[in-house]
């Protein structure tokens, strides 16, 4: 067992369950003694995501016939991926290995770590999952939203006491708390006969008012060696001092106390600890709190059930009731602080929310950090809010958010406290991983002890040490698009991007199947290209050219089959060239020719 960390509490939650029924946490199997055979086995570490992007976090740990998985997250689509809901890891490598999967550990409840779980757990035959109470509750809810009848298939083990070990085959697990922007976040120690992995998940070093860290992680330097530290590097380039929780709370309390009108706070739905604190602070000031956004309301209800959020019944009100109270007695907490178009924040700003509009005397707060890649959307949202109220507060002008990700100095402190034999930076863009490598080198790590991995690349550890290999497993992006789950070809995404940027034109022609002649003028339908009522001259010219093409190709068209497809291609190509000449745009053209 690893030593108990200093200045931490033992956390207890609900009793663990299997097949949806509660049962006590127990050791799965006795620890195996190291044998000559096991000493020859290799520990393999294989990231399926999270090494070249923000999100899609999932890592495989393989030792002989035993496999553990850490996290199953989603990645949000980029601007050039129209129509894609989100992206999940590719688990092709695990096909045929379902019986070897001993457990899936979830570090915390953010979607970039649990979002893909409903789909992938089903694909893998619902292996046992291990997590702390709030994480499990969020997982069950996401599983229910995906397919309600699959929740009963979940086999769960709740980590009630962080000091209790679990053993799965040759893996012996212990856990420890980490500070992050969601409650019940945890790190994991995976001990094998070959090496011990320390994975921090997402983390930060929370500090007091004197900028002193509240938790010392040097206890991790005492686990069985050799040790491999896998540490998130998302904040590795941030050299600014971290805001402390006392400062954030003092600033938010001041805003809540002195704002002349309503206070509207946009934050992440998973920021349960902060949401709970805001509710409590508002309650002390005699204010009512309205929660809006499906995920926010769901998460608050789950947290109230677990006892993580406590509030009097009359404190929380429906957002439709806010006009029944004085403006200076209202606090509204909503989702959408990243500028998502369908989230509550954006709908409020756009004036499309059913009961909430921004007033001049409202104070609007962004209590969240910017997820890399969302900068443009957030800036547009800020600009629109500033046009409706000048009382806008965000981290650029006041410390009202504590990041859940470790900055550069935090990373230095963690490396010095843990003193690992090997270091693998994780969960960030590639350039951040490279900066983490450089940082480790600066404080004395040798290059041979720093492993830089890409998605799908295999690292191996044996009695002679560890290295990055040339072996790779499939790790291409799997797209979720409505009910479709699978590889999206570059051609499909290119077509969607063209349609989004250039528009689409549909040409419908009715042909007499006996004579091969047009029955009437072709119909022209335009979406996202030109407005038909204002482009009568252009559409008239398109009709004339389509008639000419069909009359010229009439005999071929009359034959049907491949010849008919050839005519459609000619219509598409010639009209496409004409439109580019006239407009310098290339809409997607679909020719439909019906013979009647």
Image (cartoon, rainbow, N blue to C red):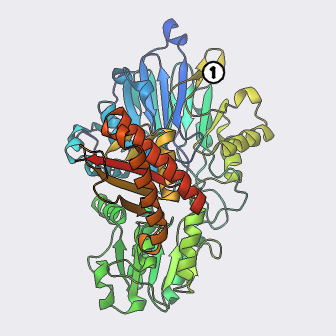
- Foreground pick, 23 / 127: 127
Q: Is residue 238 visible?
A: yes
Which residue position holds label 1?
A: 470
Determine the residue positioned at 31% across, 39% down: 558
Report which quarter residue 313 is drawn in.
bottom left
Q: Secondary structure at mark 1?
A: strand
Picture residue at 35% right of the left edge, 71% below the top = 292
Q: In the rendered view, would you say 144 is above or below 268?
A: above
In-image side of 303 versus 566 (left or right): left
Along the viewing direction, whichever of 515 and 264 lies nearer the viewer:
515
- In this rendering, is residue 92 above or below 232? above
Judge from the rendering whether residue 440 lies leftward or rightward of residue 298; answer left or right: right
Give the camera-side residue of 115 and 254: 115
Q: Residue 426, image x and y in percent?
A: 60, 40
Q: Position of residue 390 (x, y in %)?
A: 57, 86
- Name the quadrant containing residue 106: top left
Image coordinates for residue 59, horizontal then vertical, percent: 50, 34
């Amino acid at each position: 067992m690893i030593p108990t960390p200093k200045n931490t509490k033992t956390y207890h939650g609900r009793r663990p369950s299997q097949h949806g029924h509660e049962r006590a946490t127990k050791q799965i199997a006795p620890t195996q003694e190291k044998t000559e055979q096991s000493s020859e086995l290799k520990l393999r570490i294989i990231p399926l995501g999270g090494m070249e992007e923000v999100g899609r976090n999932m890592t495989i740990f393989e030792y002989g016939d035993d496999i553990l998985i850490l996290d199953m997250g989603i990645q949000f689509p980029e601007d050039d991926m129209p129509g894609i809901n989100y992206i999940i890891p590719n688990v092709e490598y695990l096909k045929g290995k379902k019986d070897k999967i001993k457990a899936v550990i979830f570090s915390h409840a953010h979607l970039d770590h649990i979002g893909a779980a409903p789909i992938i757990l089903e694909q893998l035959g619902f292996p046992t999952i291990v997590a702390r109470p709030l994480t499990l509750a969020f997982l069950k809810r996401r599983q229910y939203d995906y397919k309600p009848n699959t929740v009963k298939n979940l086999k769960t083990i709740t980590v009630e006491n962080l000091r209790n070990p679990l053993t799965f085959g040759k893996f012996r697990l212990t856990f420890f708390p980490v500070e992050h922007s969601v409650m019940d976040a945890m790190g994991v120690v995976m001990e094998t006969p070959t090496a011990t992995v320390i994975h921090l998940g997402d983390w930060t070093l929370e500090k007091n008012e004197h900028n002193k860290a509240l938790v010392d992680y040097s206890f991790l330097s005492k686990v069985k060696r050799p040790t491999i530290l896998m540490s998130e590097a998302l904040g590795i380039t941030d050299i600014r001092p971290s805001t402390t929780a006392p400062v954030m709370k003092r600033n938010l309390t001041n805003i809540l106390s002195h704002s002349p009108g309503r206070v509207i706070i946009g934050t992440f739905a998973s920021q349960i600890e902060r949401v709970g604190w805001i509710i409590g602070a508002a309650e002390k000031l005699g204010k009512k709190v309205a929660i809006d956004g499906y995920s926010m309301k769901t998460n608050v209800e789950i947290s109230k059930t677990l006892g993580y959020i406590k509030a009097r019944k009359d404190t929380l009100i429906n957002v439709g009731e806010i006009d029944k109270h004085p403006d200076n007695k209202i606090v509204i907490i909503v989702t959408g602080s990243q500028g998502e178009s369908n989230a509550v924040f954006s709908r409020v700003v756009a004036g499309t929310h059913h009961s909430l509009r921004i007033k001049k005397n409202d104070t609007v707060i962004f209590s969240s950090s910017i997820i890399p890649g969302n900068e443009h959307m957030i800036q547009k949202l800020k600009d629109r809010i500033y046009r409706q109220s000048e009382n806008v507060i965000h981290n650029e002008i006041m410390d009202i958010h504590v990041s859940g990700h470790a900055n550069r100095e935090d990373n230095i402190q963690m490396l010095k406290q843990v003193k690992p034999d090997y270091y693998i930076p994780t969960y960030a863009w590639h350039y951040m991983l490279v900066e983490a490598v450089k940082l480790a080198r600066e404080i004395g790590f040798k290059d041979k002890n720093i492993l830089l991995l890409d998605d799908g690349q295999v690292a191996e550890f044996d009695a002679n040490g560890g290295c990055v290999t040339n072996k790779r497993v499939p790790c291409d992006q799997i797209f979720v698009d409505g009910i479709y789950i699978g590889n999206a070809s570059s051609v499909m995404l290119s077509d969607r991007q063209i349609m989004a940027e250039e528009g689409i034109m549909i040409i419908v022609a009715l042909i007499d199947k006996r004579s091969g002649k047009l029955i009437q003028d072709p119909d022209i339908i335009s979406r996202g290209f030109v407005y038909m009522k204002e482009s009568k001259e252009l559409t008239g010219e398109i009709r004339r050219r389509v008639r000419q093409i069909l009359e010229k190709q009439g005999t071929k068209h009359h034959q049907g089959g491949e010849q008919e497809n050839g005519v459609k291609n000619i219509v598409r190509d010639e009209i496409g060239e004409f439109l580019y000449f006239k407009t310098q745009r290339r809409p997607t053209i679909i020719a439909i020719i019906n013979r009647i």
